[in-house]
Image (spheres, helix red, strand yellow):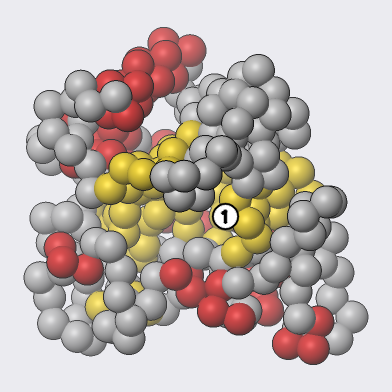
Amino acid sequence: MLTEAQVHEFREKGFLRGPRVLDETDTHQLRARLDDVMEGRSKAQPEAKRNMLGDGSEQVVVQVVNIWEADDLFNVHLYQPEICGMVAQLMGTDTVRVWHDQVQYKPPKVGGPTSWHQDHPYWPIIQPADLVSAWLAIEDADVENGCMWMVPGSHKWGPHKNGTIGTDPVTFAPLPDLAALPPGVDVTPVPCPVMAGEVMFHHCLTWHGSPPNRSSRGRPAIAVHYMPGYTRYEPKGGHLVEHRVTVGPGEVLEGEFFPTVWRGGPVTPTPI
């Protein structure tokens, strides 16, 4: 579990590098299963599988949404007790559910960028903005192969321009509208390397992005977007997984496709 100092750091900065939670055998197994899903060998299909940058792009960021629907090992990963317990601490809640998961794989040499953004503005059907993502590196993610960068304290600045911050094409620095920010804030980003099996946590309003991967190594990772048990369905836009919602507007978002993974302690994984 996390120390009080770590929880304080997260609440001040909006992100936290956590411990190693999976060993080498675990990450190798996840990488093999990810390959199966990306190449169409899994027993079922995820919610989505696509190149985020467009099918005709020379750059590639493979996005897989709800890989847990396609593979039982990724389903079990949602319930990883060490991760879920730390998320519960960071959110200050006894109940944790999954909003959805997301793989972003940047292949060697042609891996594209992920522009600066916040997560919650892209999730207009859920409130409030209290979610925490657990980003697990399946292989080492460092500056060379396109690890995430984050802006400390940016989660305190509210939603910014519907999630679009702007990205300098040369330096990859964020290009925000400073007039929309509190006076005197520092928008300098910092790199967030994460080694295989380690987890990085970030708040759903923290500014983050990742530059292209020009290295000879891939950058596979799985982010699970966790929500506190009081998260409500508030349809004010649309979302890819909205067709899975079975509750009414204003009700707590729960159900088969939004599994409860922590309820005052570990929850046994529900088989897919």
The answer to which of 20 and 222 lies nearer the viewer is 222
Q: Quadrant of the C terminus?
A: top left
Q: Which structural element holds mark 1?
A: strand
Hey, which quadrant is residue 58 in on the image? top right
- Give x and y (percent) for residue 225: 40, 54
Q: Is residue 100 left or right of residue 196?
A: left
The image shows a total of numbered marks equal to: 1
Disc 1 residue type? His
Is residue 76 among the parts visible in the rendering?
A: no
The answer to which of 256 and 102 lies nearer the viewer is 102
User: Dot 1 corresponds to which residue?
Assistant: 202
Q: Is residue 249 left or right of residue 38?
A: left
Residue drawn at x 54%, y 79% as measured from the top left = 162
Is residue 68 among the parts visible in the rendering?
A: yes
Mark 1 Cα-neighbour bin, 10 Å: few <14, some 14–19, many ≥20: many
Work out whether 140 lies above or below 241: above
Residue drawn at x 63%, y 46% as measured from the top left = 113
Hey, which quadrant is residue 84 in on the image? top left
- Give x and y (percent) for residue 17: 64, 42
- As drawn, which residue projects farthest toward the right? 184
The answer to which of 159 and 198 lies nearer the viewer is 159
- As drawn, which residue projects farthest toward the top? 25
Hey, which quadrant is residue 64 in on the image? top left
Q: Is residue 185 left or right of residue 125?
A: right
Q: Is residue 101 left or right of residue 185?
A: left
- Give x and y (percent) for residue 145: 67, 29
- As drawn, which residue projects farthest toward the front? 56
Residue drawn at x 11%, y 55% as measured from the top left = 256
- Give x and y (percent) for residue 43: 12, 27
Work out whether 8 lies above or below 212: below
Residue drawn at x 50%, y 49% as measured from the top left = 53
The answer to which of 89 and 248 lies nearer the viewer is 248
